[in-house]
Image (cartoon, grey):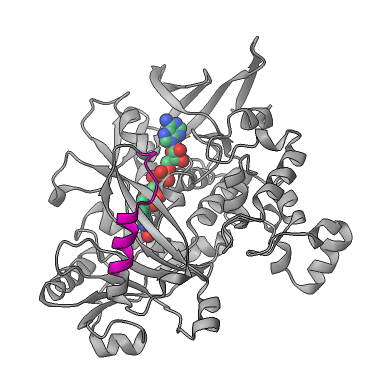
Amino acid sequence: MNLHARTNTPEGTFMRNIKTDVAVIGAGILGCTMARVLGRYKLDVCVVEAKADVGTGATKANSGIIQAGFQPKGGSLKGVSCVKGNAAYIGIAKELNVPFQNIGGLYVAFGPNGMEKIREKHERALQNGIGDLAVISGDEARELEPRLSSRAIAALVAPTTSIISPFELALATARNAASNGARFEFDFEVTKIERYGEGWRLHSTAGDVLEAKFVANMSGEEAAILDAEVHPADIVVRPRRGQFVVFDKQSVVQSTTGAKPITRALYQAQETNEGGVLITPTVEGNLLAGPTSENVRNFGQNATTEEGIEHVISVAKKLVPDLDTSTVITEFSGIRANIVNVVKEKKDFVVRASAPHFVSALGIKNPGMTSAPALVDVALSILQKEGLSCEPDPSYNPTSQGELHRKPFMQCSPEEQERMLAQDPRFGHVICRCEKITEGDVRNCMHELLPPHTFDGVKRRLRCSMGRCQGAFCTPRVMAIMADELGCTPQEISKGERGGKIVRRCLK
Ligand SMILES: Cc1cc2nc3c(=O)[nH]c(=O)nc-3n(C[C@H](O)[C@H](O)[C@H](O)COP(=O)(O)OP(=O)(O)OC[C@H]3O[C@@H](n4cnc5c(N)ncnc54)[C@H](O)[C@@H]3O)c2cc1C
């Protein structure tokens, strides 16, 4: 049972003392998917997350591609789970009402080494279970994508490559888990894990305690460190940065320059070890190029660099030479959890029982988002072998409830808009001109299931400040509305991932 005892301390803060059947550490796509899947059973589930929101780790800053599975080594957990996950997302996206587009992919060769890579990936596709992918000539590829370089000589066609919004996916997954009973505790950074009876006791930096009969450690960048609390330290994970550039909406660029939209994910089969970069449309209608692949010192080192962005642009232009860099609206980077003490040929995702009643997912980098549903199945069967009893819960509902995620005003039908305006005239007050978000939308989102506690939380939910002006107009307005809703001053609103005082205040 879920027993929450909160204690006020002399400082006025409080410590959480929670008991649960299954603790999930980390609210990235793996942790959220695990919580959702556990919702099928009569189990109490608690997700603890170090930051103030879901999906703030690698999940928020990736390419947004539901990969086909031709890249990972044949027969590896990475390869097989990618193909299974790719197939599963068609149904998951429908259930969760998350925008998902099956756009297909082209893995493009420019010379003999690229051709050799195509042969290798073709073989891997067969071994991973995608089937026999077609290889087409450069001319045939240009018929599909007219802006593809005239230097491209062939392409491997991956029809199952798809795109999704990574944050929307994580949020919708978490909301569905929460609506099926999972509890999410934010600002709960696990720092110590100790055996407690047959289960485990998790301690947070702030003195919170969570007692769990079973633990799923899905904490991405810290998963190996937490794993070493219960298992001899054997896996070393280090940060590997990937930088991206985002181009303006393709429809906007087309209307001003006439450039035809890129409709598929285009991957470069490398001729040399120059570093691969892909170009892909996003579900929001932008074009994305990247990522680089560079070792960095820590997981916080997520700034973009001149060198990195130049590299992305130069390789992207190799694929699509007429890319107009004046239409770049922003840059960002994400950090991969990269296992460094295993040789490349043997490197794979690791999902294992690290201790009794304790499963860890380690080194989950690309294509971890795609693989998440299949990796979670592996983690669940490990916990079942460890004794987790999974009695089906007849009240489980895998489908997203419309009221848990309202569409922004501007995306609603005229009838819906009329009704919304009659209820609250603040839907008529546009506060983000680029993404067309209204004051009513911001106020609404502050009351949804798993609401935002930071400015970035609102940004990720509504896309305000993600448009062409990059927040110059809307940021102070959004902060003021948030402060009004949370009953604090705009200065108290945290911009980034850590909610600190505000999250704790909201939890009281
Ligand atoms: C540049 C880049 C491009 C990528 N492109 C793709 C792609 O196109 N397709 C694809 O399928 N995959 C892609 N990936 C991989 C994918 O993003 C990751 O594999 C996936 O998001 C990992 O999810 P996760 O839940 O394991 O980790 P995360 O998303 O990192 O989540 C882990 C969570 O645990 C929390 N946490 C950490 N430590 C603690 C602690 N001590 N206590 C409590 N909580 C903690 C973190 O705050 C975080 O929220 C890409 C990754 C990168 C970086």
Q: Residue, x 55% and y 83% (percent of image)?
A: 255
Position of residue 463 in the picture relative to residue 483 (left or right): left
Which quadrant holds the N terminus? top right
Q: Residue furthest top?
A: 10
Q: Residue, x 51% and y 53% (percent of image)?
A: 167
Q: Residue, x 54% and y 66% (percent of image)?
A: 99
Can residue 351 be found in the magenta stretch? Answer: no
Asked where in the image residue 112 lies, by quadrant, the reply is bottom left
On screen, 135 above or below 363?
below
Q: Residue, x 44% and y 73% (percent of image)?
A: 102
Which quadrant holds the C terminus? top right
Please indicate, yes or no, whether residue 376 appears anywhere in the rendered image.
Answer: no
Name the foreground residue: 193 vs 485. 485
Asked where in the image residue 178 lies, by quadrant, the reply is top right
Magenta stretch: give its range. Answer: 299-315
Position of residue 82 in the picture relative to residue 31 (left or right): left
Name the foreground residue: 417 vs 174. 417
Q: Position of residue 271 (x, y in %)?
A: 15, 70
On screen, 328 above or below 216?
below
Can residue 305 be found in the magenta stretch? Answer: yes
Position of residue 150 in the picture relative to residue 482 (left or right): left
Q: Position of residue 19 (x, y in %)?
A: 54, 24
Asked where in the image residue 168 lies, by quadrant, the reply is bottom right
Please indicate, yes or no, whether residue 29 appears anywhere in the rendered image.
Answer: yes
Position of residue 126 in the picture relative to residue 400 (left or right): left
Q: Position of residue 20 (x, y in %)?
A: 53, 28
Name the foreground residue: 486 vs 47. 486
Q: How many marks?
A: 0
